[in-house]
Image: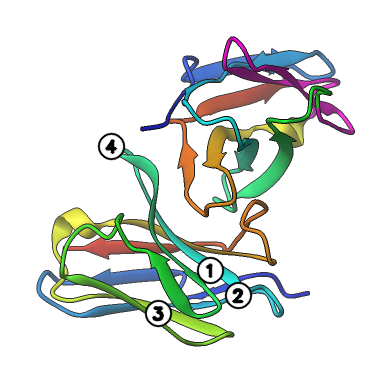
Amino acid sequence: DAGVIQSPRHEVTEMGQEVTLRCKPISGHDYLFWYRQTMMRGLELLIYFNNNVPIDDSGMPEDRFSAKMPNASFSTLKIQPSEPRDSAVYFCASSLSTPYEQYFGPGTRLTVT
Amino acid sequence: AQTVTQSQPEMSVQEAETVTLSCTYDTSESNYYLFWYKQPPSRQMILVIRQEAYKQQNATENRFSVNFQKAAKSFSLKISDSQLGDTAMYFCAFMKGSQGNLIFGKGTKLSVKP
């Protein structure tokens, strides 16, 4: 299996621009998670989906962040407008059936200048 | 709210030696899972080992084993015969029941020296 695929691997953008991060989960997995990793806050869950439906978005920092999962093989995390404090590594993870073994993608390093 | 604490920001060990990484957690839940994830310099998060709270037997995966002390809310990771490839950040994580929210500790940076 190809594993969880994320794109782009690196993104540099200017403050105020829209940023879209993409994720393709492992085929057959029905849970998908978005995490953010920063030096200050560590790893934190932003949102997760089950069968394409958002289950818990309490970790989404504010209205500038939105996530969608239009089908079982694709999800996006959008930040509009982006701010320097959004600079972080964003991970997507997926799991099969039960949510307790999560497989992570390689992450997207976002830098907002 | 659940919390996960890793009290050792950095550790080092000689190749072939054994090292133990500490983790404590706080929860009032009875049904939960505990994990250790490894993050090498490539930043890929890799599951090392998993423990179900209802199991008394400590989990083992090859050179990796845990010491799960439920009453003390302690979940340490022992790495035997350390290898250079074990150099990485190690994160302890907690999950309540069958929910999806992994709560991570701040991590321990492990360096294996030749």
- Looking at the rendered structure, whether the residues under marks 1 and 3 are on a common chain is answered as yes
Of tags 1 and 4, the one toward the viewer is 1
Residue A13: give x, y in percent of width and height: 22, 72
Q: Is residue B17 above or below residue B60?
A: above
Indicate the chain on which mark 2 is placed.
A
The residue that disc 3 covers is A76
Identify the mark nearer the N-term, 1 or 4. Answer: 1
Q: Are marks 1 and 3 in contact (CB under 8 Å)?
A: no
Rate crowding at label 2 as few (under 14), some (14 to 19) or many (20 or more) other CA atoms within 10 Å. many
Of tags 1 and 3, the one toward the viewer is 1
Report the magenta residues as a range: B59-83
The residue that disc 2 covers is A25
Q: Is residue B53 left or right of residue A22?
A: right
Identify the mark nearer the N-term, 3 or 4. Answer: 4
Of tags 4 and 2, the one toward the viewer is 2
Identify the mark nearer the N-term, 4 or 2. Answer: 2
Q: Are marks 2 and 1 in contact (CB under 8 Å)?
A: yes
Residue A63: give x, y in percent of width and height: 15, 69
Query: How many numbered circles are shown?
Result: 4
Q: Identify the image quadrant of the C terminus of chain A.
A: bottom left
Q: Are marks 3 and 2 in contact (CB under 8 Å)?
A: no
Rate crowding at label 1 as few (under 14), some (14 to 19) or many (20 or more) other CA atoms within 10 Å. many
Determine the image quadrant of residue A36: bottom left
Amino acid type of the residue tagged 1 in the rendering: Leu
The residue that disc 4 covers is A40
Identify the mark nearer the N-term, 3 or 2. Answer: 2
The residue that disc 1 covers is A32
What scheme was used to colour the molecule? rainbow
